């Protein structure tokens, strides 16, 4: 028995030799990574547009359509179009677009029924409004100064539009219209809806039953009806429940309706961001001894808002376009003024040009928001690879 055990022990491989070899080990020189070879145009076309027979078919159909439509559109839009100011009769002699309609009606489309000689005031208000938005987009301005700049800017815009002081003629808001109304409803609506949406998202995740039930009920109720319904209730039904002699301005009621509607949709976006935050972030905040509001303010919400930039901007773009629905309650937004402009019998045949003009304005604003969101994602280091 002893001999067997001794033999087994002696048969074990020794470990001294491998460790000795490891001490003298010299790693081989690492091979350089292979150089990245960018595929050529033909390779890219084959891999992306002609990789299957049906992709090749759709590609050829698209090329055929573009080859036939683009020259015709360019001819209608530019070559054969009437660009200078001219009467409507002159447009019947050209085969292209009649941009004389836009030249004739652009002030009405942009500013509605605002007094003609005073239209420099809504023009200045729009410039200030856009300037406030642009200033707010730059990181150096993301501080408490915005809490002063925005109220002052909005007050100046209101004074310009309304008048009645500083020698400006008073203009009631039922004469306001066009681009100032669209910007006001969209920017103020989304701006005030954003903090409300954060409160609703936190309330929906709250452990307090009453708070959670209220937030869930509000969000689901608003999201369950179209914006037209909310505007109709705010503008038509709500005044019926007010005491006699008390009235609330129609424009203010529409603004509140848009704020309520946008807040419900943004709340779900923010809640999605909160759910995407790993549980370890909450535990880390607790380990640091932070209170609930401190952890939300400094750790959780910044991450949640950062990862939800695309759906937030998507909601903003949707709300900007949905402001055109206020025409059902008689507010002259940009789309409504364009519709009224094409009701002129002399120019009615050229409504397409008016639609194109307004579509370009909407596209410029929406495209700017989209590009800014992409820049903001990159600036905040979202941590995902762009393709």
Image (cartoon, rainbow, N blue to C red):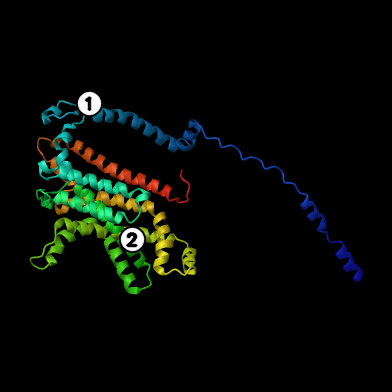
> Which class describes the residues within 10 Å of circle 2: few (<14), some (14-19), or many (20+)?
many
Between residue 213 and residue 21, name the one nearer to us: 21
The N terminus, quarter of image: bottom right
Residue 223 to residue 344: above or below: below
Whether residue 225 is visible? no
Left or right, 386 with respect to 141, comes to right
Q: Which residue is mark 2?
A: 267
Q: Nearer the viewer, mark 2 or mark 1?
A: 2
Number of disc labels: 2
Looking at the rendered structure, the secondary structure element under dot 2 is helix
Q: Residue at x 22, y 26 (%)?
A: 80
Residue 284 to residue 376: above or below: below
Q: Quadrant of residue 265?
A: bottom left
Q: Are marks 2 and 1 in contact (CB under 8 Å)?
A: no
Of the numbered discs 2 and 1, the one sitting upstream in the chain is 1
Left or right, 26 with respect to 8, comes to left
Q: Which residue is mark 1?
A: 80
Q: Horizontal and vertical percent for residue 81?
A: 21, 28
Residue 149 to residue 116: above or below: below
Whether residue 275 is visible? yes
Left or right, 186 with respect to 119, comes to right
Distance Cα–Cα, label 2 vs label 1: 49 Å
Looking at the rendered structure, the secondary structure element under dot 1 is loop
Q: Horizontal and vertical percent for residue 168?
A: 11, 48
Q: Residue at x 14, y 45 (%)?
A: 112
Q: Horizontal and vertical percent for residue 63?
A: 37, 31
Between residue 236 and residue 316, name the one nearer to us: 316
Q: Horizontal and vertical percent for residue 133?
A: 29, 48
Q: Residue at x 87, y 63 (%)?
A: 10
Q: Residue at x 13, y 63 (%)?
A: 239
Q: Quadrant of residue 274?
A: bottom left
Between residue 170 and residue 305, name the one nearer to us: 170
């Amino acid at each position: 028995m002893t001999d067997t055990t001794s033999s087994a022990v002696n048969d074990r491989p020794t470990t001294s030799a491998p460790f000795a070899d490891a001490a003298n080990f010299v790693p081989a020189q690492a091979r350089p990574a292979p150089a990245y070879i960018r595929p050529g145009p033909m390779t890219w076309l084959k891999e992306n547009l002609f990789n299957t027979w049906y992709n090749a078919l759709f590609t050829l159909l698209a090329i055929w359509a573009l080859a036939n439509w683009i020259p015709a559109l360019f001819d209608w839009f530019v070559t054969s179009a009437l660009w200078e100011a001219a009467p409507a009769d002159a447009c019947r002699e050209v085969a292209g677009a009649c941009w004389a309609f836009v030249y004739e009606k652009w002030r009405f489309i942009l500013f509605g029924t605002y007094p003609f000689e005073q239209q420099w005031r809504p023009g200045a208000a729009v410039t200030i409004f856009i300037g406030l938005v642009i200033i707010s987009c730059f990181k150096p301005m993301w501080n408490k100064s915005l809490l002063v700049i925005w109220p002052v800017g909005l007050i100046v815009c209101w004074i310009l539009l309304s008048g009645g002081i500083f020698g400006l003629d008073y203009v009631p808001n039922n004469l306001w219209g066009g681009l100032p109304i669209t910007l006001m409803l969209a920017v103020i609506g989304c701006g005030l809806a954003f903090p409300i949406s954060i409160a609703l998202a936190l309330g929906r995740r709250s452990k307090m039953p009453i708070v959670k039930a209220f937030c869930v009920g509000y969000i689901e109720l608003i999201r369950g009806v179209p914006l037209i319904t909310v505007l109709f209730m705010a503008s038509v039904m709500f005044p019926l429940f007010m005491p006699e002699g008390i009235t609330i301005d129609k424009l203010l009621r529409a603004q509140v309706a848009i704020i309520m509607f946008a807040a419900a949709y943004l709340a779900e976006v923010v809640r999605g961001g909160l759910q995407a935050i790993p549980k370890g972030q909450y535990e880390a905040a607790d380990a640091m001894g932070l209170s609930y509001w401190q952890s939300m303010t400094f750790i959780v919400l910044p991450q949640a808002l950062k990862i939800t930039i695309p759906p937030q901007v998507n909601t903003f773009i949707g709300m900007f376009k949905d402001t055109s629905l206020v025409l059902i309650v008689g507010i002259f937004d940009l789309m409504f003024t364009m519709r009224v402009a094409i009701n002129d019998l002399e120019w009615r045949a050229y409504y397409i040009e008016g639609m194109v003009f307004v579509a370009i304005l909407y596209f410029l604003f929406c495209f700017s928001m989209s590009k800014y969101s992409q820049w903001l994602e990159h600036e905040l280091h979202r941590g995902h690879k762009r393709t």
